Amino acid sequence: MGGGGQQTEPAEPGSGKTAGVYTWEEVQKHRSRNDQWLVVNRKVYNISQWVKRHPGGSRVIGHYAGEDATEVFAAFHPDQKFVQKFLKPLLIGELVATEPNQDGNKSAELIEEFDRLREQAEKRGLFQARPLFFCLHLCHIVLLEALAFLLLSHWGTSWTMTLLCSALLATAQSQAGWLQHDFGHLSVFKKSKWNHLVHKFVIGHLKGASANWWNHRHFQHHAKPNVFKKDPDINMMDIFVLGNTQPVEYGIKKIKHYPYNYQHQYFFLVAPPLLIPVFYNYNIMKTMFTRRDWVDLAWASTYYIRYFYCFVPLYGVFGSLALMMFVRFLESHWFVWVTQMSHLPKEIDHERRQDWLTMQHSIQCVIVPSPVVKVKDEKNEVPFRCFKVHCIILGLANRKKCIVVQFLSQS
């Protein structure tokens, strides 16, 4: 493979052969299911055989086959030194010196500016989490659930108390959802195993869901946000058509499972009330059983045991089930208005091979842009128009310190 003195065959991992040099055109040929290369910091890696052993799953890493994955690799792996040892056996070469750092439509200038910003954030300690903040967050969730149970135990199960306690439980569930998100991103503790453990406790014991199910979906969402067939969050199972491309494709193919011309009206009857109590509940249970994820199933079981132990004496079995579904109904509205309403109105399309930072920007629905601020580095002070976005972009653990994260345009 390659010309101009390049080796004709890629060096096999661990074979001891001299690594070769490759052009982007050559790298991009290796993006099939069984033949996958990717580039990190100009180094070319053959992940074809190793992809199935990837701790984050084969899909999330496979989405970057044939591309530069430097930025997403840095964001998804907090401990860079640890993961480097996994990369060494996979190294088969590097890019030709005349090749750019990025492939395709990726903005080298934007990425360079972003790297400068990340370095400044690291120097200022913005990646350092405050465990006390997350501890207090967890405590207030537990207190809300305890308060709901105590109110029902003391004042009875009248309609007024039931509605009040449903609101408390829905708030606790919603807050637990945001909390598990931070632990799921491994952004609280320095060691991943502690993040994983607390993540399983919060999403499993407090919410009755699956950590592995969430990781599998959410990591893909951040790897390729709003990209058809790569972002599970935009898989609408033909109930809705999204973006500017899908409606045209459905029209050409004469696909009409639902009256899509009225989807802006029936959306409010389907997504907010049914997403969590119906779709997520069914999908989570199905995933745990079909994949035989007994660990996550055990964690989720502790939620249901605790819940029914507390509420069956008050409401009975069917009353407790009705209360649970009503709480999830309320939580689902909260969740949809926070997540779906900020993502679905933005660009949704097939793979366009954009740089990771641009993709993160393209899915954020910013109603009121922030004013021009000044980003100061060692060389100069330059004004940029910025806004606050998802903390995963920089990997910031403490939301209170997630301030200037992403460039929109120089002013």
Image: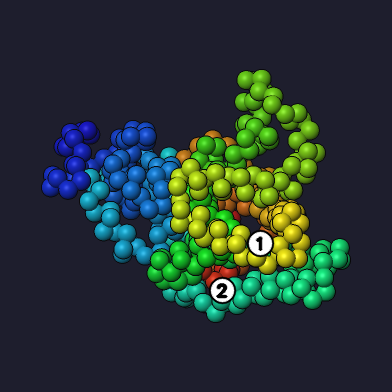
Quarter of the image holding residue 157? Answer: bottom right
**Residue with the mark numbered 2:** 134
Tell me: residue 150, above or below residue 348: below
Instruction: Choose mark 1 or mark 2, whichever is in front.
Output: 1
Q: Is residue 409 left or right of residue 366?
A: left
Query: Which quadrant of the figure contains the C terminus?
Result: bottom right
Marks 1/2: CA distance? 27 Å
Which of the 4 image quadrants contains residue 132? bottom right
32 relative to 322, above or below: above
Q: From the image, which quarter does the N terminus lie in?
A: top left
Q: What kind of residue is marked 1?
A: Phe
Question: Which residue is drawn at the image coordinates 24% and 54% (left, top)?
Answer: 88
The amino acid type, in three-letter code, at marker 2 is Phe
Percent position of residue 44, x then y:
28, 46
- Looking at marks 1 and 2 on the same chain, the residue that comes earlier in the sequence is marked by 2
Q: Is residue 85 visible?
A: yes
Residue at image point 22% right, 51% down: 89
Q: What's the mark number on residue 202?
A: none
Mark 1, secondary structure of its residue:
helix
Residue 372, percent from left and from top = 63, 64
SS for callout 2: helix
**CB atoms at circles 1 and 2 under 8 Å apart?**
no
Give the x, y percent position of residue 110.
Answer: 48, 54
Residue at the image position 18 percent from the left and 42 percent from the top: 11
Q: Which residue is mark 1?
A: 308
Between 196 and 302, which is closer to the camera in this rendering?
A: 302
Decide if residue 385 is on the left or right side of residue 288.
Answer: right
Is residue 113 found left or right of 228 in the rendered image?
left
Front residue of 155 and 239: 155
**207 up-or-down from 257: above or below:** below
Q: Nearer the viewer, residue 359 or 133?
A: 133
Q: Which residue is located at x 39 percent, y 44 percent?
A: 58
